């Protein structure tokens, strides 16, 4: 069987069966592509219908507007919390957070280590040392101011130990 059309395009000597097989393969490929496209379109349609379930254009616009206002509220809340946290950290710098205590016998004849030196420091190593000396006559307490980890007044051995313990924290 010869075809004038095939002769005019230069394929007159070709067996027509090869042409039919090629066309069948092409049709099969196009059929598979159509099935894949329809499947994807069906999934997209289901997702769209689930998204739009019970909504019309105006209510969707309101939903989106509400989401933006919620997002702005959350952003403002985060900013407020960040400011409050900075304020708390600033205040924590001046709170006493380092502690050193040394108990000792002020007088060797007394027992029980009733005397003590207590060092309380903030983050900048500013604070005080409270020294309480217990004797048979009574209990005497006094303080010494600490600035940048040192004292203007000479510290006793126990006071220095308490200060060293507090500064290691």
Image: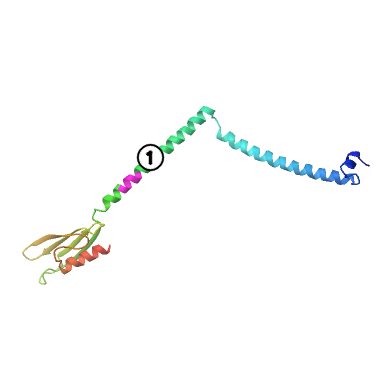
Q: Residue 21 location in percent, x, y?
A: 84, 45
Q: List the single residue furthest toward the bottom.
A: 108
Find the residue positioned furthest to the left.
137
Residue 2, x across and y down, in percent: 93, 41
Name which residue lies at 9% across and 61% down: 140
The number of callouts visible is 1
3 vs 72, nearest the viewer? 3
Q: In this view, does 156 lie above or below 84?
A: below
View extreme (right): residue: 1
Look at the image and say whether residue 34 sits in the magenta stretch: no
Is residue 83 highlighted in magenta? Answer: yes
Q: How is the image coloured?
A: rainbow
- What's the magenta region? 81-86
The N terminus lies in quadrant? top right
Q: Quadrant of residue 105?
A: bottom left
Quadrant of the frame with the C terminus:
bottom left
The image quadrant that residue 43 belongs to is top right
Provide residue 82's location: percent of width, then percent of height: 35, 46
In the visual, does 50 lie left or right of 2?
A: left
- What secondary structure is found at the residue carrying circle 1? helix
Coordinates of residue 45 in the picture (x, y in percent): 62, 35
**Looking at the image, residue 17 lies above or below residue 132:** above
- Residue that mark 1 sits on: 76
Q: In this view, does 43 lie above or below 113?
A: above
Residue at 24% x, 62% y: name it.
166
Q: Quadrant of residue 42?
A: top right
Left/right of residue 63 with respect to residue 93 in the rendered view: right
Our reading of the magenta stretch's main secondary structure is helix
Please give the name of the residue rendered at 65% of the width and 38% of the height, measured from the top-left corner.
41
The crowding category of the residue bearing disc 1, from other C-alpha atoms within 10 Å (few below 14, some 14 to 19, many at least 20), is: few
């Amino acid at each position: 069987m010869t075809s004038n059309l095939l002769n005019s395009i230069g394929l007159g000597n070709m067996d027509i069966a090869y042409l039919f097989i090629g066309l069948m393969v092409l049709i099969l490929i196009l059929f598979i592509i159509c099935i894949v496209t329809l499947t994807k379109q069906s999934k997209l349609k289901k997702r769209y219908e689930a998204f739009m379930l019970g909504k019309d254009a105006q209510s969707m616009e309101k939903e989106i507007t509400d989401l933006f206002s919620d997002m702005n509220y959350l952003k403002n809340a985060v900013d407020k919390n960040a400011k409050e946290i900075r304020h708390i950290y600033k205040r924590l710098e001046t709170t006493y957070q380092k502690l050193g205590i040394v108990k000792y016998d002020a007088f060797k004849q007394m027992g029980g280590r009733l005397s003590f030196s207590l060092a309380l420091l903030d983050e900048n190593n500013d604070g005080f040392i409270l020294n309480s000396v217990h004797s048979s006559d009574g209990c005497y307490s006094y303080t010494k101011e600490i600035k940048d980890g040192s004292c203007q007044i000479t510290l006793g051995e126990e006071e220095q130990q308490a200060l060293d313990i507090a500064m290691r924290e």
